[in-house]
Image (spheres, rainbow, N blue to C red):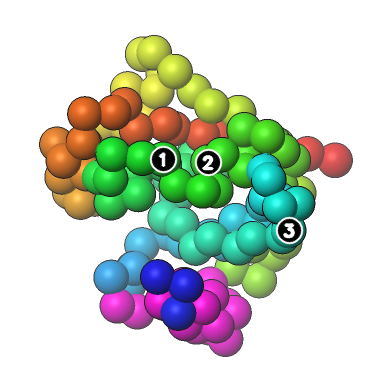
Amino acid sequence: MADFNEQVIAEFRANHGKVGGPFEGAPLLLLHTTGAKSGKQRISPLMYLPDGDNYVIFASKAGSDTNPAWYHNLKANPGATIEVGDDTISVAAEEVTGDARDALYRKQADLYAGFADYERKTTRIIPVVVLSASS
């Protein structure tokens, strides 16, 4: 997976935020987090849902029964950075729950059927995180 992510990151940066393959045509960002245990900087390419000035991300991990590492990193260190296109933005992460979470997840699943599949594949509630620009 690390090699795949490295290729996506390189393609993203070379093409002003655009990539091919499974992410072709989808809104993609690079999430920079600080490791919850290691303290090391990590980068994860993620699809997002634009929501006004915010960026909504989904801890789907392709329907795995565990949350992705980036989710744990954001819970421990909610200050992060994202790359969107050629822009780098400092953000604050906040998990959304309840009806607000369900509405955002449903919107993403309606746009990208893979997210509905991920939800069917797991028994966990897939976390939804809103990234808001911070100063």
- How many angstroms separate mark 1 from mark 2 (CA)? 7 Å
Vertical order, 19 against 53 (above or below)? below
Q: Residues within 10 Å of mark 3 (few under 14, many from 20)?
A: few
Say the numbered circle drawn on residue 67.
1
Vertical order, 115 against 18 (above or below)? above
Say the numbered circle drawn on residue 110.
none
Residue farthest to the front, as pictured: 37
Q: Residue at x 53, y 60 (%)?
A: 44
Q: Residues within 10 Å of mark 1 (few under 14, many from 20)?
A: some
Residue 103 pos. (x, y %): 33, 24
Q: As rendered, which of 102 and 61 lies closer to the eye?
A: 61
Main SS of the magenta part reads helix
Residue annotated with mark 3: 40
Give the secondary structure at mark 3.
loop
Q: Is 10 colored magenta in this rendering? A: yes
- How many angstroms separate mark 1 from mark 3 (CA)? 19 Å
Residue 126, can we see it?
yes
State the extent of the magenta-drawn residues as a range.
4-21
Give the secondary structure at mark 2.
helix
Q: Are marks 1 and 2 in contact (CB under 8 Å)?
A: yes
- How many angstroms separate mark 3 from mark 2 (CA)? 15 Å
Vertical order, 102 against 88 (above or below)? above
**Which image quadrant for residue 99?**
top left
Q: Is 14 colored magenta in this rendering? A: yes
Question: How many numbered circles are shown?
Answer: 3
Residue annotated with mark 2: 71
Residue 53, can we see it?
no
Q: Residue at x 21, y 36 (%)?
A: 122
**In this image, 33 relative to 106: left or right?**
right
Which of the marked residues, 1 or 3, is nearer the chain's N terminus? 3
